[in-house]
Amino acid sequence: MEPLLKLLTSMLTQILETLDAVIDVGGVFDSEKDRFDHHQRGFDHTFGRGFVTKLSSAGLIYKVILQFRVFYLKNGILSQNLQVSDL
């Protein structure tokens, strides 16, 4: 049985470019390309809503997932398949 997910540890750009998602390495934050690093100059992403602490890679992922859920809830997309208690 093929695993659903394979984890790889690398800092080599030529390897990172071949991966579906990259977390905490690579020097890039681009949620559309599933790149979640916070180690670049000029990084200033915060959670917003009055919070001023810069986000970690995990915080970036959390914020993106939360934004998707809010979008889908507002548009009734999740409610077709999930109960509100599932969220």
Image (cartoon, rainbow, N blue to C red):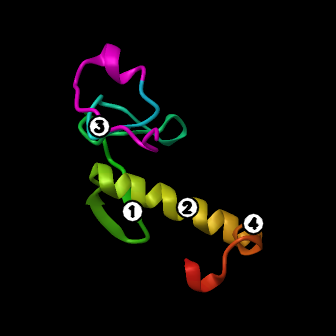
Front-lying residue, 77 or 64 = 77
Secondary structure under the numbered disc 4 in the rendered image? loop
Q: Which residue is mark 3?
A: 42
Label 4 vs label 3, nearer the camera: 4
Residue at horizontal 29 percent and vertical 37 percent from the top: 42
Q: Mark 4 near mark 1, Cβ–Cβ under 8 Å?
A: no
Front-lying residue, 3 or 73 = 3
Q: Which residue is mark 4?
A: 77
Q: Which residue is mark 1?
A: 47
What residue type is disc 3 on? Gly
Quadrant that contains the C terminus: bottom right
What residue type is disc 1 on? Phe
Alpha carbon separation for disc pair 2 and 1: 11 Å
Residue 79: x %, y % from top left: 73, 75
Q: Earlier in the sequence, mark 2 or mark 3?
A: 3
Residue at horizontal 27 percent and vertical 40 percent from the top: 24
Q: Which residue is mark 2?
A: 67
Secondary structure under the numbered disc 2 in the rendered image? helix
Q: Is residue 47 left or right of residue 71?
A: left
Magenta includes 15?
yes
Which residues fall within the magenta stretch? Answer: 1-18
Q: Is residue 78 left or right of residue 4?
A: right
